[in-house]
Image (cartoon, rainbow, N blue to C red):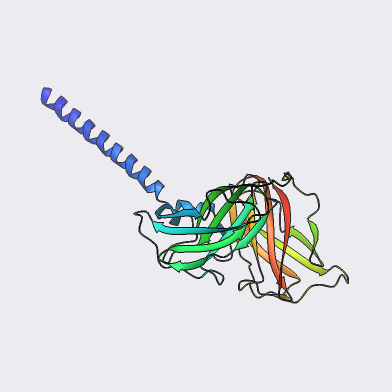
Amino acid sequence: MKKRLVILIAIMIALTACSKTTSEQMKQGGAGSADHGGHGGNHGEEAKAGAGASVQALWKLSSAKPMAKQNTTLTLQIQDGQGKPIEKFDINHEKQMHLIVVSKDLSYFDHIHPEYKGKGVFEVSTAFPAGGEYKLVADFIPAGMTATTQTHWIQVEGEKAPQVQVQPEAHLAKTADGKNITLTTDGQLAAGKELTLKFHMEDAATNQPVTNLQPYLGAVGHVVIMSADAEQYLHVHPMDEKSTGPDALFMTTFPKAGIYKVWGQFQQNGKVFIVSYVIQVS
């Protein structure tokens, strides 16, 4: 009887240890899962959970207290999880890095391209229009990895601009650079649902369709989307890169419900123009 009891206890201990090991392996496996930003789709914050888990950016400003309306040099050192420089980057829409700059209230937007200096170092000079907080989003692809984003908040000194509330717009029709541009979707704006965003453009003076859009960074246009709190970021590429208008189509999926601002960038007659909308995603 005692011998049977000892055997039974040993079996129970072994089963408990096995269960614990399996549980730990599942936890470790989940931490390493990756989200991939695909061509023609979203390159978002989620990429940090995958490729970004072994990538980090060290941000440096030429001044500890950057001033509004004065040039500030931004330097980014891109390195791996062991602190070694990542030296090779894929070309993504004609550039090795896209840097998005937005004010905290999303009223200011800029899309610039740092120059690669080698050994994982990128550098760019820019001037901020007013004092306040700005979010910087570096969007790049280390060779052999997926699309990756690294973000950084900075405080800019100087006179602040009046704060603008990020409120959904009832009518998604705007006039920009002499063009009437309407934004529509192929379904209800809902989180977790793949949607097509369509920008339709007509000449504001003649109401004729715009059919002579030029490639901007190798495509008919680019779309950047950010949530009202600036935490969710999507960089969306067009479905048909060679389109010249009047329609430019982009496919995306909003990660969660909330208010988002959408910026579309296009080019005509050698001039880049931007149109923006604020939308509510259910």
- Where in the figure is residue 201, as x and y percent of width and height? 78, 67
Q: Quadrant of residue 41?
A: bottom right
Name the side, left or right, on which 183 lies relative to 83.
right
- Where in the figure is residue 223, as x and y percent of width and height? 65, 61
Residue under the point 87% across and 70% down: 207
Name the side, left or right, on which 115 lies relative to 228.
left
Count of number-bearing discs: 0
- Quadrant for the C terminus, please: top right
- Where in the figure is residue 30, as x and y percent of width and height? 40, 47
Q: Nearer the viewer, residue 194 or 32?
A: 32
- Does the rendering let one see residue 194? no
- Does the rendering let one see residue 26? yes
Q: Nearer the viewer, residue 182 or 271?
A: 271
Residue under the point 81% across and 72% down: 209
Q: Residue furthest top?
A: 1
Residue under the point 45% across and 54% down: 58
The relative height of residue 230 versus residue 247 in the rendered view (above or below) is above
- Quadrant for the N terminus, please: top left
The relative height of residue 14 versus residue 5 in the rendered view (above or below) is below
Q: Residue furthest right?
A: 206
Residue under the point 88% across and 70% down: 205
The relative height of residue 13 versus residue 127 in the rendered view (above or below) is above
- Where in the figure is residue 71, as x and y percent of width and height? 60, 59
Q: Quadrant of residue 8?
A: top left
Q: Quadrant of residue 79?
A: bottom left
